[in-house]
């Protein structure tokens, strides 16, 4: 078989039970109100103020089933653009000499944590599709010929790969691993996983410029809820998650992500087949498109491309729009499979 890369988008995680981006805010604020959990009162008040002023939504009093929330991309994209332009919104300053300056920065961090908390809650019980896929690839003898890429922050594919005793999981960067490096030092095949938008289990110290992998995606959120254990053991600075939200204005300046992107590009140059799973090829992912076009145009032969993004109830119009996005950018030779992600996990040999 030719060397193959499998690219996981949000639809792959959604097939496991994780929420899609459009449902993040509704799920978060409904859960908040049902539990009446306002323990982090500052965060709740800041998020409420932001949604009320910018989108005319009172997240604590309005009927959340009828409210039309902005997309996560819109909500955080406004803040990212304000930072890039060095501008502010009324009542939401970027930076000044006031004691409550950089409100934009805090709101942005709160939105990232909101997303992380919803993903944590919904991925705690999974169907096991990623593990099924990895085990099936292992049984077929394909696993060591695979390259995995993901735009998802959850650790579904991480756990599936790390659970194998016959391979070593490689994130493509130097980092301090915990249970993920049990096999390091042994002579076993290395299977790369490039998480190009970061991960919920990556903990970064900006002072030491060091990164470690916590036990699971909940670990980073527990540290962020109580800053005291989130301090770097070396310099005592507060660590942060490495998460690049899905906006047009992505900040890829983190040195570890730069290495991941470089390794991903180098690995993709050696593949013959690229399989997209649960990825709709959104307009905002220009960094992904740039990477793919560099890979595609540097080849002497034609890269085989397969898209697996079908799901029950998917509308014809949605399918056509998605096909047009792929073919407009990658060419008309792209193959669109009728299988769902679950069917692909059960029988990957039908497409590889």
Image (cartoon, rainbow, N blue to C red):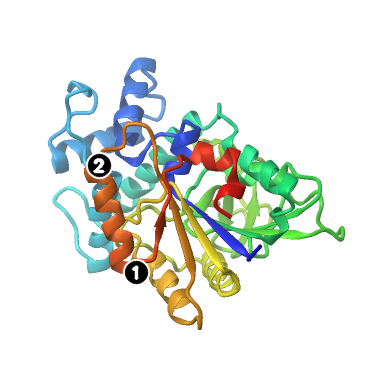
Q: Which mark is residue 331?
A: 1
Asked whether 167 or 229 is in front, the reply is: 167
Q: Residue at x 28, y 59 (%)?
A: 325
Asked whether 215 or 268 is in front, the reply is: 268
Task: Locate residue 250, reporting x and y percent.
Answer: 36, 62
Vertical relation: 10 (above or below) 126: below
**Can you say which quadrant of the picture contains the N terminus?**
bottom right
Could you tell me which secondary element the residue under label 2 belongs to? Answer: helix
Q: Earlier in the sequence, mark 1 or mark 2?
A: 2
Task: Locate residue 116, reporting x and y percent.
Answer: 45, 40
Q: Is residue 300 left or right of residue 102?
A: right
Q: Is residue 195 left or right of residue 249?
A: right
Task: Locate residue 237, reporting x and y percent.
Answer: 57, 55
Q: Which mark is residue 316?
A: 2
Vertical relation: 165 (above or below) 334: above
Q: Is residue 271 left or right of residue 291?
A: right
Q: Is residue 97 visible?
A: no
Q: Residue at x 76, y 55 (%)?
A: 168
Residue 87 lies in what quarter of the image? bottom left
């Amino acid at each position: 078989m030719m060397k193959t890369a499998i690219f996981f988008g949000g639809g792959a995680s959604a097939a496991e039970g994780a929420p899609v981006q459009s449902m993040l805010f509704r799920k978060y604020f409904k859960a908040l109100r049902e539990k009446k959990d306002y323990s982090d009162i500052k965060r709740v008040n800041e998020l409420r103020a932001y949604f009320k002023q910018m989108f005319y939504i009172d997240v604590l009093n309005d009927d959340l089933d009828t409210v039309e929330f902005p997309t996560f991309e819109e909500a955080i994209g406004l803040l990212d653009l304000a930072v890039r332009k060095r501008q502010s919104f009324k009542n939401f300053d970027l930076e000044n000499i006031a004691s409550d300056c950089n409100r934009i920065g805090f709101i942005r961090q709160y939105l990232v944590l909101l997303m992380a908390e919803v993903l944590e809650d919904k991925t705690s019980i999974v169907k096991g599709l990623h593990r099924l896929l990895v085990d099936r690839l292992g049984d077929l003898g394909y696993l060591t010929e695979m390259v995995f890429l993901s735009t998802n922050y959850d650790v579904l594919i991480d756990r599936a790969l790390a659970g194998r005793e016959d391979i070593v999981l490689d994130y493509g960067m130097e980092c301090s691993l915990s249970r993920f490096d049990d096999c390091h030092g042994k002579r076993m095949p290395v299977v790369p996983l490039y998480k190009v938008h970061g991960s919920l289990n990556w903990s970064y110290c900006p002072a030491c410029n060091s990164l470690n992998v916590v036990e699971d995606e909940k670990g980073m959120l527990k540290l962020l809820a109580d800053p005291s254990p989130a301090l770097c053991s070396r310099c005592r600075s507060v660590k942060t998650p490495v998460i690049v939200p899905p906006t047009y204005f992505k900040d890829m300046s983190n040195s570890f992500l730069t290495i991941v992107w470089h390794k991903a590009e180098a690995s993709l140059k050696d593949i013959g087949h690229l399989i997209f799973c649960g990825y709709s090829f959104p307009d905002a992912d220009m960094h992904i498109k740039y990477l793919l076009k560099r890979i595609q145009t540097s080849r002497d032969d034609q890269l085989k491309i397969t898209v697996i993004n079908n799901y029950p109830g998917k509308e014809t119009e949605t399918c056509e729009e998605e096909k047009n996005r792929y073919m407009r950018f990658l060419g008309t030779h792209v193959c669109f499979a009728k299988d769902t992600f679950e069917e692909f996990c059960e029988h990957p040999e039908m497409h590889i």
